[in-house]
Image: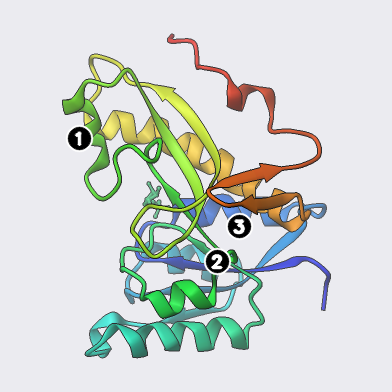
Amino acid sequence: MSDKLRLGVLISGRGSNLQALIDACRELTFPAEIVIVISNTPDALGLERARHADIPCVVVNHKDYDHRAPFDSEMTRALDEAKVQLVCLAGFMRLLSETFVEYWRDRLINIHPSLLPAFKGLNVQSRVIEAGTRFSGCTVHYVRHEMDVGPIIAQAVVPVHNADDPDTLSTRILEQEHRIYPIVVRWIAENRVRIEGARVIVSGPGPPKEMLLNPTPK
Ligand code: GRF
């Protein structure tokens, strides 16, 4: 077994963040590898991406379960069987039980397409546009039981333009998601991330400079 951090990625759909992780893991020096992809929907495009990359896939279809508890424990069983060390939610659209979140506490991260704690939940981009904020972005955070809550590891900022609709804004943000998710996984794999209460401290060389700057509007 290699000494790379073993990732399990949970998806429900398109899987573009999964693809960003697959691409990062292809680099020989990347300190993590995806050992399993789990989807709760059998026709998720992300499953195709995983199969194409020869990554073992499991479908745990929520429709086969009457309750959340057995659905979640089946996912934990599959993740444990694959000896997963870090679970990455990547567009996983089911709420997770407290038991699951506690079991994977501090080993479970999520990516959300807003600057948390603003704009939790769904339909984020149309709400951002309606609210008239000038900036938005994305957040990678540790998962706690409440939705879209948990210690923030990294964020990237993008401008919101007057002409934006949810699609254009989402595309701009997604580009940043694909950058920061692999960066965070690398930090965790390199043991550089420490949680102190609600805060996350990253030691060693910091994030790429561009991540901390307001983007210049074009
Ligand atoms: C992303 O915007 C992610 O932030 C959110 O769900 C979307 C998933 O997109 N949690 P994809 O499936 O990774 O393309």
Image quadrant occupied by the C terminus: top left
Residue position marked by numbered label 2 in the rendering: 52
Residue position marked by numbered label 3 in the rendering: 22
The answer to whether mark 1 is within 8 Å of ligand 1 is no
* Disc number placed over residue 127 in the picture, else none: 1
* Mark 2 vs 1: CB contact within 8 A: no
Q: Give the structural element (helix, strand or loop) at label 1.
A: helix
Q: Is residue 174 above or below residue 73?
A: above
Frontmost residue, 179 versus 96 = 96
Where is residue 18 shown, x and y percent of the image?
Answer: 51, 57
Mark with earlier residue (1, 3): 3
User: Looking at the rendering, which quadrant does residue 115 occupy?
Assistant: top left
How far separated are the C-alphas under marks 1 and 3? Answer: 31 Å
Residue, x 32% and y 29% (percent of image)? 169
Residue, x 56% and y 49% (percent of image)? 20
User: Which amino acid is tagged 2?
Assistant: His
